[in-house]
Amino acid sequence: MTDFLQFVFAGSALGARYALVALGFVVIYRATGVINFAQGGLVALGAYIAYHFTDRIGAPFVIAVLAAVAACAIVGVLIQRVVLARMVGQPAFAVIMITIGLLFVIEQLIPTLWGYNSHNLGDPWGIKTVDLAGLTLAERDLWTLAIAAMALGGFFAFFRLSRYGLAMRAVAIDQEAALAQGISVGAVVAVSWAISGMVAALAGVTLSTGATAVSPTISFIALAAFPAMILGGLDSPGGAVIGGLLIGITQTLTAGYQPEHAAWLGDNFHVVMPYVVMIVILMVRPYGLFGVPEVDRA
Amino acid sequence: MSTPAVTDPPAPARSAPLPPRLLRTRTSRVWALVLVGAYVLAPLTVSDFWLSVLAYAGIAAIGAFGLNLLTGYAGQVSLGHAAFIGVGAYAAGWLGADEGLPLPLWLLGAALIGGVLGAVVGPFALRLRGQYLVVVTLGLVFLAEHVFRNWRGLTGGNSGRAIDPPASFGVDFNDFSLGGFAASRAQSWFWLIWALVAVVALIAANLARSRAGRALQAIRDRDLAAELTGVDIARTKVAVFALSSALAALAGALLGAYQEFVSPSEWNLVLSIQYIAIIIVGGLGSVYGPVLGAVFVGSMPRVIEEYSSSIPGVSSGAGDDGVITVFALNQVLFGVLIIGFLIAEPRGLTALARRVAARVNRSSATPARTTDNEEET
């Protein structure tokens, strides 16, 4: 039982990281109608910028994280303004491929700038743990949950209560109608990219704390957030969070129990477990758990 | 994405049967002659390095024809191509290297296995629409890689396996000699691979111009309208997915046999995206775009690797000096190519080539209305 709770806790922390990445996907999808494959690149970029500030500049960790968040927001807006603004009105396929192209570029620029070796992020948590009711909880996981909760709470407050949040929801429903109501769709899209850059940076930082160092493989880990996003439904921010947690917990439980109880599934099955869950769910619900089905009218 | 299918012009009243379309006009006869000449003569004049570059490009073209039918014509974006290429490579290992079947049988067998797997996976994947399909096929790549890593008896696990199937079909392509002339492996495999490219190209071109090809484009452009005009969407989608997987597996079988060794890490997302880059650069939904794209995109990594020492700022390994490694540069270039072509010329090299040809035609005083327009999709 202790094991199980331990796994669920670690899984929730992992899931919170996935949720941050998945939320970035959903925000962009709602604003532009495409999945942004470059999100994984932004996640890695966030981690590296934070590392750059702590290690190379010697800034305090909090400052480094804030700098990473700001930088990723700016990069997100730049990507939208410089590249994707040219693709307005193009088919979704073309836009997705552009974001894949961007992912390739970002993914390789990172080791070009910072090298292929892993680095220590310089976070204050390291491998420290806290004992609580018989459970050993990693400090980094506790902080990850706290940061994710704050970020997600902030996002939903903004999304539900502010005028900009209302504008974002309007744009997601119908861009032209939103435009006719005096909403600046361009500004909403830019804000969406900034938000997605910010959550990407937080995801990158929390993914690379402690023993998992900053390394170019972070953008690969972020790929597992795809199932989280799909699971919840492409256009549902709440679904992204639930999908993230589900995937994180399932993955950790698989890593914990599968080698012993289902060894025939092969080594490292937990790496592909998110995709298995995604495929199974999509077989039952083709638009995810909370996604809105597309209705096709002639 | 591109213009809707052009209806064929009314057939002329014909008394004698026409020659095949490839040889109907003078331009196409000249082209056919040039291509056949290049095919025969290239291995005799070009160095083994370039032959091997072209051989890999030919293999990529075969796989890209499949993806082009699926993505370019039918509009179903799949990131799962790499999985089926891997399946083909291991099928060649099993049927050719382990069971010792002759060349035509292991090639066909690999294509068949790929096609059947595609037909099995297809119905599940293709009921999803648009971007859900993209992500599910992405998952397919990871699942396939997991199977490849763990099915040690067939794939050799993480350390990979050798694939050395028999390669004789009348002549032995591994040890080719005719009279006093003995060809190197690069030379004879060039002939083998590009002959197969020609066969696949003809099949794909004929399919694209047939009723089935028009059904694919109708699904791409507006699936609801396609269904109303009598296209069985589900069946057509699964069929094209199976065909695309079969061609991917055929390419994989050739790839495995040509490089003689494969490991599970080759069949990853990057490979899938390379194929996407090939069909985008070549021209989505154009008949011969995959060949142009494959020669351009497929040869780029090897050319850069070969000449890395003379490109400033490029190091040949992770430890060397230089701003960017060869591997990183290649991947960045893939990204830049995809972005650049989609923004600047979404119809790819095919459209570029056509524009150049039109300009040449205009500047030479000959009337420019001789070429037929049937390759336009």
Image (cartoon, coloured by chain):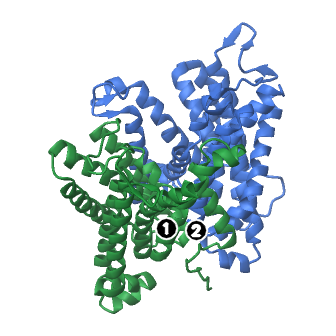
A67 or A267: nearer the viewer: A267
Chain letter corresponding to the colour green: A
Residue A92 has which mark?
1
The quadrant in which residue A143 appears is bottom left
- Disc 2 sits on a residue from what chain? B
**Dot 2 crowding, Cα within 10 Å, few <14, some 14–19, many 20+:** some
Residue A18 has which mark?
none
| Residue at image point 40% right, 65% down | A20
Same subunit: marks 2 and 1 = no
Give above or below for A194 relative to B359: below
| Residue at image point 36% right, 85% down | A160
Residue A222, position as x, y percentages in the image: 45, 55
Residue B244, position as x, y percentages in the image: 69, 51
* SS state under label 2: helix
**Dot 1 crowding, Cα within 10 Å, few <14, some 14–19, many 20+:** some
B239 or A45: nearer the viewer: A45
**Horizontally, is B339 left or right of A164 in the view?**
right
Determine which residue is flagged by label 2: B130
* SS state under label 1: helix
- Disc 1 sits on a residue from what chain? A
Query: Quadrant where the C terminus of chain B lies?
Result: bottom right
The quadrant in which residue A64 appears is bottom left
**Amino acid at pointer 2:** Gly
Chain letter corresponding to the colour blue: B
**Amino acid at pointer 1:** Ala
**In this view of the protein, can residue B82 be seen by the observer?**
yes
Residue furthest front in the image: A133
**Horizontally, is A249 left or right of B204 in the view?**
left
